Amino acid sequence: MLTQDQQEALQEIANIGMGQAGSSIAQVFDHFVQLSVPRILVLAPEDMADALDKLVDIGQITAVRQAFHSRMRGEAIVLYGAQRCNDLADLMGYEQKLDHIAEIELLLDVTNILVGACLGGIAEQLNSDIGFSAPSLMADRVPAEALLRAEDVSWRSALLVEVNFRLEQRSFACHLVILMAEEEIRTMAEALDKFLEAY
């Protein structure tokens, strides 16, 4: 659904957007952030759960979702592993052990920072405004393959953009996955063509 040129342009744009997100996280936590190169896949619904399981490979996960809307609409999902908050709470000055409610609130806040910075960076490069819903808990401590089952989605194919963030010298890591349905991929392709024409 994307040409090779469009896919390479999206990877570069996503790389810059992820870098901005990493910089935002680094400023908040005063810690260097390591980023993976974004991975871009177009998948059928029946392949999504298996792809997430292979991409993430962190066993039981908690997922926070945040919808975005502009000329392009979709959903960002941030996946956290079992160790999710120990170091994060320490960096944010929590002196006592987090209870479950405080832990989820912390993950919602981190998701908001990550998604806003990353998607904002992508939208800026494509000359598009973007808005966000409030982040919400999608799943808590479930296997990755249980997140997006084929029977739960209505689209025929979706664009998956994945990157992982890791705090250097800390156990905290998470994966940001951006999902867009097929009609939104076409809109994205048009925006990428305009981006390519400008260079």
Image: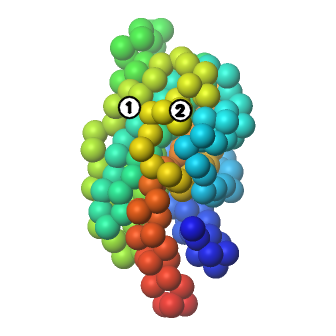
Residue type at mark 1 is Leu
Residue shown at the point (53%, 53%) measured from the top left: 157
Sequence-wise, the earlier of marks 1 and 2 is 1
Is residue 12 in sight in this rendering?
Answer: no
Q: Are marks 1 and 2 in contact (CB under 8 Å)?
A: no
Residue shown at the point (42%, 9%) measured from the top left: 99
Q: How many marks?
A: 2
Q: CA distance from mark 1 to mark 2?
A: 23 Å
Comparing labels 1 and 2, the label whose residue is closer to the camera: 2
Residue 128 position, x and y percent, is: 34, 71
- Using the image, tell me which numbered label, if any, was put on residue 149: 2
Residue 159 position, x and y percent, is: 54, 56
For label 1, the SS is: helix
In this figure, which residue is indicated by the disc labeled 1?
108
Residue 98 position, x and y percent, is: 44, 12
Mark 1 Cα shell of 10 Å, populated few (<14), some (14-19), many (≥20): many
- Using the image, tell me which numbered label, if any, was put on residue 99: none
Q: Quadrant of the N terminus?
A: bottom right
Mark 2 Cα shell of 10 Å, populated few (<14), some (14-19), many (≥20): some
> How is the rendered protein coloured?
rainbow
Residue 12 figure quarter: bottom right
Is residue 54 in sight in this rendering?
Answer: yes
Decide: is 13 above or below 39: below
Residue type at mark 2 is Arg
Decide: is 105 above or below 78: above
Q: Quadrant of the C terminus?
A: bottom right
